[in-house]
C-alpha cells in the first residue's frame, strides 16, 4: 500500500508505516464482522417475517455484532472510542469493504502522540473518505476518533469505528 505523507515533519515520517499498519490490522479484523452482519441482514430481509420477528432478528444480529466488535477493538481503541456503541448500525455493505479494493491513504503527523490517517475510496457512485485519529497511549497507537465524509464536501461526520 502506498502512503502519501502530507504536512508531516521529517522526524515523524518514519512512523507512517507502523501507524498505518496498526490501523489496517484493526480494519482487517473488523471487516469480517461487518461482512457477516451484512449477510445476516440480507438473509433476514429475504425471509417473510412479521415486523416483530424482524425486530427480534435485528436485535440478535446487532447483539452478536456488538459482542464480536468488543472482542476485536479491546486494547486497540482509546477509552473515548470504546465508550461509543460499536457498531451503531449495519449498512447495506460493510463500512470498510473498500480495503479489499482500490483506495488511497494520506498520513499526517504534527505531534509525537497524534497521527491522522485518511482513506479515500469509491463506494458505488460516490467518492468517500474516512479520517482516523490515532493517539499514542502507553507506547501503543490506539484509534481515538473516526470520521466519514464525501470527497466533494469539506464536512466530516463523527462516527464509531
Image (cartoon, grey):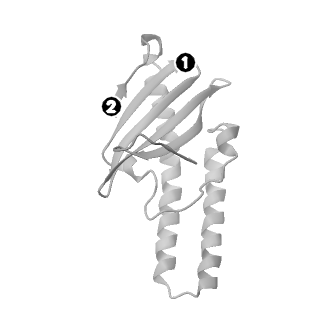
Q: Which mark is residue 54?
A: none
Q: Quadrant of residue 77?
A: top right
The residue sitting at 66% across, 64% down in the picture is 63
Residue 137 sits above or below residue 37 on the image? above
Residue 86 sits above or below residue 117 on the image? below
Q: Are marks 1 and 2 in contact (CB under 8 Å)?
A: no
Q: Mark 1 vs mark 2: give the one in front.
A: 1
- Sort mark 1 into few (<14), some (14-19) or many (20+) by Cα contacts within 10 Å: few
The N terminus lies in quadrant? top left
- Please state the horizontal and vertical placement of residue 70, each as a whole percent of the image: 66, 51
Compared across the picture, whether 62 is left or right of 31 comes to: right
Residue 75 sits above or below residue 110 on the image? below
In this view, the residue in front, 56 or 25, is 56
Q: Tell me which label, 1 or 2, sits earlier in the chain.
A: 2
Alpha carbon of mark 1 to alpha carbon of mark 2: how far?
Answer: 22 Å
In this view, the residue in front, 22 or 135, is 135
- Please state the horizontal and vertical placement of residue 38, each as a whole percent of the image: 48, 65
How many numbered dots are placed on residues in this image?
A: 2
Circle 1: element type: strand
Circle 2: element type: loop
**Residue position for label 1:** 111
- Please state the horizontal and vertical placement of residue 126, each as a whole percent of the image: 32, 53
The residue sitting at 46% across, 81% down in the picture is 46
Residue 47 sits above or below residue 161 on the image? below
**Residue position for label 2:** 2
- Sort mark 2 into few (<14), some (14-19) or many (20+) by Cα contacts within 10 Å: few
- Please state the horizontal and vertical placement of residue 109, each as a whole percent of the image: 48, 22
The residue sitting at 46% across, 33% down in the picture is 117
In this view, the residue in front, 126 or 107, is 126
The residue sitting at 56% across, 25% down in the picture is 114
* In the image, farthest residue toward the top: 11
Amino acid at each position: 500500500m502506498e502512503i502519501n505523507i502530507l504536512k508531516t515533519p521529517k522526524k515523524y515520517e518514519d512512523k507512517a508505516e507502523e501507524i498505518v499498519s496498526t490501523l489496517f490490522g484493526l480494519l482487517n479484523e473488523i471487516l469480517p464482522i461487518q461482512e457477516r452482519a451484512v449477510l445476516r441482514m440480507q438473509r433476514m430481509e429475504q425471509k417473510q417475517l412479521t415486523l416483530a420477528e424482524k425486530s427480534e432478528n435485528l436485535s440478535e444480529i446487532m447483539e452478536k455484532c456488538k459482542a464480536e466488535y468488543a472482542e476485536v477493538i479491546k486494547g486497540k481503541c482509546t477509552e473515548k472510542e470504546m465508550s461509543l456503541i460499536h457498531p451503531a448500525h449495519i449498512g447495506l455493505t460493510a463500512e470498510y469493504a473498500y480495503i479489499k479494493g482500490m483506495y488511497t491513504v494520506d498520513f499526517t503527523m504534527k505531534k509525537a502522540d497524534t497521527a491522522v490517517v485518511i482513506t479515500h475510496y469509491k463506494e458505488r457512485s460516490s467518492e468517500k473518505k474516512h479520517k482516523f485519529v490515532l493517539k499514542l497511549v502507553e507506547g501503543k497507537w490506539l484509534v481515538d476518533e473516526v470520521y466519514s465524509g464525501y470527497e466533494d464536501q469539506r464536512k466530516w461526520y463523527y462516527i464509531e469505528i
